[in-house]
Amino acid sequence: MKKILIPTDFSVASLRLVEYAILNNPNTPLNIVLVAGYRLPDTRWALTHFNKSEEVNKQLTDSFVIAKRSLRLEHKKSIQAMSFELFTGNNSCAFQNFLEQSGADDAIIPKAKSLYCKNRKWFDTTRFLKKNVNNVTEVPVERDEELSQQRYSLINLLNL
């Protein structure tokens, strides 16, 4: 079984990287790990009440869940497992430890910066994957929807 790390921003566009992995590894059982970066809370109370599954579930949209489900059904012979992992570090050394624990040697990343994290708690792990994984494949991926202008609003910058 081949384990492949793929960065995600929980958008349908990021699932195109999963499809690329499936189509370019025919007859190979795959363990797909969708990796998202998350900044841990800085208070003791928030840290003790942190739940990885809960944070991931907050990010899942209906369109993402439907697209992921249809992808798994369409390619059920190829996909042995598909899971989410959160990288909570902030440097390459922490990411190397994350890689050792994951046991993956392959990654598929977008060629251009196409992943967008809506919340300042989340960040794109593409640069960590590109720098630290042995076998990295860059794939051109375009977003279906345009990024909202709210991205530059004062409210969004303050994360209110």
Image (tube, grey):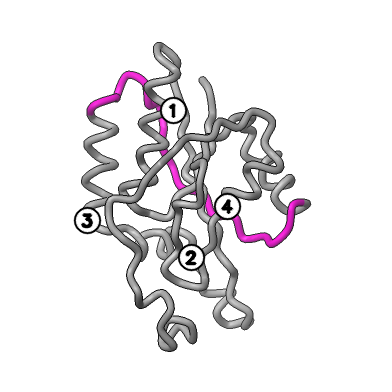
CA gap, disc 1 and disc 4 = 18 Å
Q: Position of residue 120 (x, y in %)?
A: 51, 73
Q: Earlier in the sequence, mark 4 or mark 2?
A: 2
Label 4 Cα crowd, 10 Å radius (few <14 / some 14-19 / many 20+): many
Q: Is residue 93 magenta?
A: no
Please report the bounds of the magenta region as a residue range.
74-92
When the figure is inspected, residue 16 is found, relative to residue 158, above or below; the finding is: above
Residue 1 position, x and y percent, is 51, 20
Residue drawn at x 29%, y 24% is 76
Disc number at residue 125?
Answer: 4
Residue at the spot 64% in from the left edge and 42% down from the top edge = 130
Neighbour tally class for label 1: few under 14, some 14-19, many 20 plus, Cα within 10 Å: many
88 sits to left or right of 146: right
Of 51 and 115, the residue lying toward us: 115
Q: Is residue 88 magenta?
A: yes
Q: Which residue is mark 2?
A: 51
State how far apart marks 3 and 4 are (Cα).
Answer: 23 Å
- Mark 4 in CB contact with mark 2 (< 8 angstroms): no
Question: In this picture, is 109 found above or below 153?
Answer: above
The residue singled out by tag 1 in the image is: 21
Q: Give the number of the mark in front: 2 or 3.
A: 3
Q: Select label 1 or label 2 by which is in front.
A: 1
Which of the two discs, 3 and 4, labels the residue nearer the N terminus?
A: 3
Residue behind mark 3: 62
Residue count near mark 3 (Cα–Cα under 10 Å), binned few <14, some 14–19, many ≥20: few
4 or 2: mark nearer the eye: 4
**Above or below: residue 72 compared with residue 62:** above
Kind of residue sitting beneath label 2: Asn
